Image (cartoon, rainbow, N blue to C red):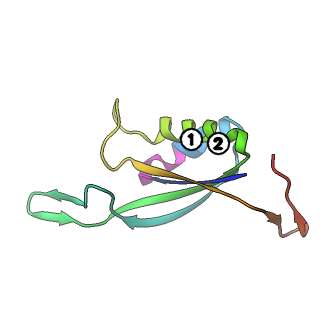
Amino acid sequence: MKMIFAVVRPEKVYEINGALADTGFFASTKWQVSGRGKQNGIQVGEIVYDEMSKVVLMVACGDADKNEVIDVIMEHAQTGESGNSGDGRIFVMPVEESYTISSSTKDNEK
Protein backbone atom coordinates (compact mmCIF):
# COMPACT_ATOMS: atom_id res chain seq x y z
CA MET A 1 0.00 0.00 0.00
CA LYS A 2 1.16 3.56 -0.73
CA MET A 3 0.35 6.98 0.71
CA ILE A 4 0.48 9.76 -1.85
CA PHE A 5 0.90 13.33 -0.64
CA ALA A 6 0.20 15.91 -3.35
CA VAL A 7 0.97 19.57 -2.61
CA VAL A 8 -1.19 21.50 -5.08
CA ARG A 9 -2.67 24.91 -5.82
CA PRO A 10 -5.91 25.46 -3.85
CA GLU A 11 -7.91 26.28 -6.97
CA LYS A 12 -7.14 22.82 -8.42
CA VAL A 13 -8.35 20.71 -5.46
CA TYR A 14 -11.95 20.17 -6.59
CA GLU A 15 -10.86 19.31 -10.12
CA ILE A 16 -8.29 16.80 -8.82
CA ASN A 17 -10.72 15.22 -6.33
CA GLY A 18 -13.39 14.97 -9.03
CA ALA A 19 -10.99 13.30 -11.45
CA LEU A 20 -9.81 10.88 -8.74
CA ALA A 21 -13.43 9.98 -7.93
CA ASP A 22 -14.20 9.48 -11.63
CA THR A 23 -11.31 7.01 -11.71
CA GLY A 24 -12.57 5.11 -8.65
CA PHE A 25 -10.44 6.76 -5.94
CA PHE A 26 -13.07 8.36 -3.73
CA ALA A 27 -11.21 8.77 -0.44
CA SER A 28 -8.81 11.61 0.26
CA THR A 29 -7.84 13.92 3.08
CA LYS A 30 -6.85 17.53 2.58
CA TRP A 31 -4.95 20.09 4.60
CA GLN A 32 -4.66 23.82 4.04
CA VAL A 33 -0.95 24.64 4.25
CA SER A 34 1.46 27.38 3.27
CA GLY A 35 5.05 27.24 2.19
CA ARG A 36 7.43 27.71 -0.67
CA GLY A 37 9.22 25.53 -3.14
CA LYS A 38 12.43 25.78 -5.08
CA GLN A 39 11.47 29.20 -6.43
CA ASN A 40 11.88 30.65 -2.89
CA GLY A 41 8.61 32.60 -3.04
CA ILE A 42 7.63 35.14 -5.68
CA GLN A 43 8.06 38.86 -6.14
CA VAL A 44 5.31 41.06 -7.56
CA GLY A 45 6.60 44.59 -7.99
CA GLU A 46 8.34 45.43 -4.75
CA ILE A 47 6.36 42.96 -2.66
CA VAL A 48 7.89 39.54 -1.93
CA TYR A 49 5.50 36.70 -1.10
CA ASP A 50 7.66 34.33 0.92
CA GLU A 51 4.99 31.67 1.43
CA MET A 52 2.10 30.67 -0.79
CA SER A 53 -1.19 28.97 0.15
CA LYS A 54 -1.32 25.34 -0.94
CA VAL A 55 -3.39 22.26 -0.20
CA VAL A 56 -1.97 18.85 0.61
CA LEU A 57 -4.10 15.98 -0.66
CA MET A 58 -3.45 12.63 0.97
CA VAL A 59 -4.55 9.53 -0.95
CA ALA A 60 -3.95 5.93 0.14
CA CYS A 61 -3.94 3.32 -2.60
CA GLY A 62 -2.71 -0.13 -3.46
CA ASP A 63 0.76 -0.54 -4.92
CA ALA A 64 -0.71 -1.45 -8.31
CA ASP A 65 -2.78 1.77 -8.37
CA LYS A 66 0.03 4.19 -7.48
CA ASN A 67 0.90 5.23 -11.03
CA GLU A 68 -2.74 5.75 -12.00
CA VAL A 69 -3.34 8.03 -8.99
CA ILE A 70 -0.15 9.99 -9.75
CA ASP A 71 -1.12 10.36 -13.42
CA VAL A 72 -4.59 11.71 -12.51
CA ILE A 73 -3.12 14.21 -10.04
CA MET A 74 -0.42 15.34 -12.49
CA GLU A 75 -2.93 15.85 -15.30
CA HIS A 76 -5.36 17.88 -13.23
CA ALA A 77 -2.96 19.82 -10.98
CA GLN A 78 -0.95 21.31 -13.82
CA THR A 79 -1.74 24.86 -14.96
CA GLY A 80 -1.23 26.08 -18.50
CA GLU A 81 -0.33 23.83 -21.39
CA SER A 82 2.96 22.60 -19.97
CA GLY A 83 2.67 23.54 -16.30
CA ASN A 84 4.01 26.47 -14.31
CA SER A 85 6.33 26.98 -11.39
CA GLY A 86 4.36 26.48 -8.18
CA ASP A 87 1.98 23.84 -9.56
CA GLY A 88 3.04 21.51 -6.77
CA ARG A 89 4.82 18.35 -5.80
CA ILE A 90 3.92 14.69 -5.22
CA PHE A 91 5.49 12.49 -2.56
CA VAL A 92 4.95 8.72 -2.33
CA MET A 93 5.53 6.78 0.88
CA PRO A 94 4.98 3.14 1.86
CA VAL A 95 2.17 2.27 4.27
CA GLU A 96 2.93 -0.66 6.55
CA GLU A 97 -0.56 -1.14 7.97
CA SER A 98 -3.95 0.57 8.20
CA TYR A 99 -6.96 0.06 10.43
CA THR A 100 -10.63 1.03 10.33
CA ILE A 101 -11.50 2.55 13.67
CA SER A 102 -15.29 2.02 13.48
CA SER A 103 -14.95 -1.75 13.05
CA SER A 104 -11.62 -2.20 14.87
CA THR A 105 -10.33 -4.18 11.90
CA LYS A 106 -7.03 -4.26 10.08
CA ASP A 107 -7.47 -3.28 6.44
CA ASN A 108 -6.27 -5.40 3.54
CA GLU A 109 -4.59 -3.75 0.56
CA LYS A 110 -7.03 -3.23 -2.29
- How crowded pointer 2 is (Cα within 10 Å; few <14, some 14-19, many 20+) is rated as some
* Main secondary structure along the magenta-highlighted residues: helix
Secondary structure of residue under mark 2 = helix
Q: As displayed, is residue 27 above or below residue 25? A: below
Residue 37 rendering spot, x and y as whole percentages:
33, 58
The spot of residue 48 in percent (x, y) is 17, 64
Residue shown at the point (56%, 37%) measured from the top left = 72
The outermost residue toward the left is 46
Which residue does the numbered mark 1 point to in the structure image? 70
Q: Is residue 78 left or right of residue 93?
A: left
| Residue at 48 percent of width and 65 percent of height | 32
- Residue 86, compared with residue 69, is above or below; it is below
Q: What residue type is labelled 2?
A: Lys
User: Picture coordinates of residue 70 (x, y %)?
Assistant: 56, 41
Q: Is residue 75 left or right of residue 97?
A: left
Q: In this view, does 57 lie to the left or right of 11?
A: right
Question: Residues at badges 1 and 2 in contact (C-beta under 8 Å)?
Answer: yes
Q: Give the range drawn in magenta.
A: 8-14
> Which amino acid type is shown beneath numbered disc 1?
Ile
Q: Residue 66 carries which label?
A: 2
Is 79 colored magenta in this rendering?
Answer: no
- Foreground residue among 30 and 98: 98
